[in-house]
Image (cartoon, helix red, strand yellow):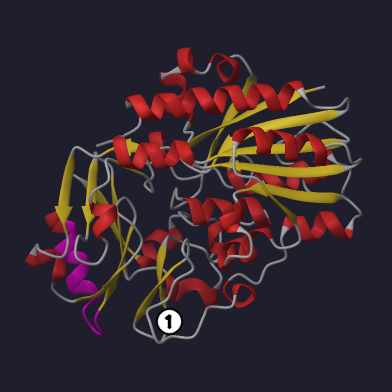
């Protein structure tokens, strides 16, 4: 069994980074990461750039490998929507409520895809301000007179997820690497400036071909070059920080939770994702489902009740009462290279090679690298 890595909320997690960035800019925010003062800060967020993965292929990313930095934990689950919301609010998952990729909407009997911001046909659209009501760090920056800019693909502008986690930021749409570098350098001319730039193709390559694959390594080289170009164009008094939302593992085994009777019986909804399953039981069946999943996944996954996950601090020191029912009655988290799939409901995910979400080092460890001018 691999060691469980419960996120280091309070001084060593992604949730601690945004407040520290604002503190570095002079705002009266906690600075648990003790970041140095700067007139301008840029956060380069690379989807899927796990610290352990980068270390394993440092030769492909010599610029990043040569930077000073440290390792943070992503938060649970180690997945994009949860980490983006932690970075967007400075709150732990238990406080901001984005506790997984696909979550039950209490009282509806339906799952909500927090990444695609998608509900089943016939249901009303989800209001981002209601699903994630916390004030964002971008709103706090703007209120303090700081130009806050988000640079990312145009297709994400105005989406529900963007409105939930980036509201307050001025969106600068940019498709290519060249365009993103240019938009960042333009935004960093302001003083003070608070800029975030996102790159997602490394994660996509990892899902489809696996981390360490030829395509993944090609993307890692692109990320390294982009980071160097971002750093070289920074005006004096700037700080560039490079981080990620999660790491990744390549699955060597898959279990179809829809087809294994022991895993299907008593289950009303199968949420979360393949490395961090939220299992919602039918009324009165929670204990039965917990026992069946524990027995079936023995030696392969940590399987706990909602209460155990909350009390163990997986989602942070506290989970708001309003968010409790978003968490599965049972939470199943593989520690081997297992993916718990649902091919009928989530066909594309079942075809992946690389996955993330769990409490292993490879998925939790993310870098925090820095450049100062």
Is residue 283 in the magenta section? yes
Left or right of residue 80: residue 293: left
Is residue 276 in the magenta section? no
Q: In terms of image quadrants, where is residue 276?
A: bottom left
Q: In terms of image quadrants, where is residue 207?
A: top left
Judge whether residue 29 can be spotted in this image: no
For image coordinates 47% across by 61% down, the residue present is: 115
For image coordinates 30% across by 35% down, the residue present is: 209
Q: Using the image as rendered, state which of residue 240 and residue 329 is in the foreground.
A: 240
Residue 77: give x, y in percent of width and height.
43, 52
Q: Is residue 65 above or below residue 183?
A: above
For image coordinates 34% across by 83% down, the residue present is: 109
Q: Main secondary structure of the magenta part?
A: helix
The residue where tag 1 is placed is 106
Q: Is residue 67 above or below residue 360?
A: above
For image coordinates 43% across by 40% down, the residue present is: 203
Left or right of residue 174: residue 361: left
- Total residue callouts: 1
Q: Using the image as rendered, state which of residue 339 and residue 63 is in the foreground.
A: 63
Q: Using the image as rendered, state which of residue 218 and residue 35 is in the foreground.
A: 218
Task: For label 1, count other residues whose C-alpha is less than 10 Å away and answer few (under 14), some (14-19) or many (20+).
Answer: some
User: Dot 1 lies on which element?
Assistant: loop
Which span of residues is magenta-colored?
282-294
Residue 354: give x, y in percent of width and height.
31, 40
């Amino acid at each position: 069994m691999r060691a469980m890595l419960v996120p280091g909320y309070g001084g060593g997690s992604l949730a601690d980074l945004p407040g520290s960035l604002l503190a570095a800019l002079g705002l009266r925010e906690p600075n648990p990461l003790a970041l140095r003062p700067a007139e301008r800060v840029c956060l380069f967020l690379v989807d899927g750039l796990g610290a352990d993965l980068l270390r394993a292929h440092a030769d492909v990313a010599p610029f990043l490998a040569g930077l000073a930095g440290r390792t943070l934990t992503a938060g649970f689950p180690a997945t994009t929507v949860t980490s983006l919301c932690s970075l967007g609010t400075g709150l732990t998952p238990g406080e901001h409520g984005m506790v997984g990729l696909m979550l039950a909407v209490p009282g509806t009997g339906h799952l909500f895809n927090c990444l695609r911001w998608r509900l089943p046909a016939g249901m009303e659209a989800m209001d981002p301000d209601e699903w994630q009501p916390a004030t964002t760090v971008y709103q706090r920056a703007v209120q303090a007179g700081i130009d806050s800019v988000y640079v990312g693909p145009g297709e994400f502008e105005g989406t529900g997820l963007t409105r939930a986690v980036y509201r307050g930021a001025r969106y600068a749409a940019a498709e290519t690497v060249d365009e993103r570098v240019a938009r960042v350098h333009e935004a960093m001319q302001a003083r003070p400036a608070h800029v975030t730039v996102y790159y997602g193709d490394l994660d996509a390559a990892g899902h489809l071909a696996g981390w360490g694959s030829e395509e993944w390594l090609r993307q890692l080289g692109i990320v390294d070059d982009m980071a160097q170009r971002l750093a070289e164009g920074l005006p004096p008094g700037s700080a560039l920080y490079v981080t990620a939302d999660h790491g990744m593992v390549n699955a060597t085994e898959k279990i179809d939770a829809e087809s294994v009777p022991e895993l299907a019986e008593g289950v009303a909804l199968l949420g979360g994702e393949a490395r961090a399953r939220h299992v919602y039981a039918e009324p009165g069946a929670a204990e039965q489902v917990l026992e069946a999943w524990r027995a079936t996944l023995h030696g392969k996954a940590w399987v706990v009740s909602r209460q155990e996950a909350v009390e163990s601090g997986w989602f942070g020191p506290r989970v708001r009462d309003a968010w409790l029912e978003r968490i599965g009655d049972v939470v199943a988290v593989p520690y081997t290279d297992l993916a718990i799939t649902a091919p009928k409901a989530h066909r594309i995910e079942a075809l992946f090679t690389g996955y993330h979400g769990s409490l292993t080092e490879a998925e939790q460890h993310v870098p925090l690298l820095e450049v100062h001018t």
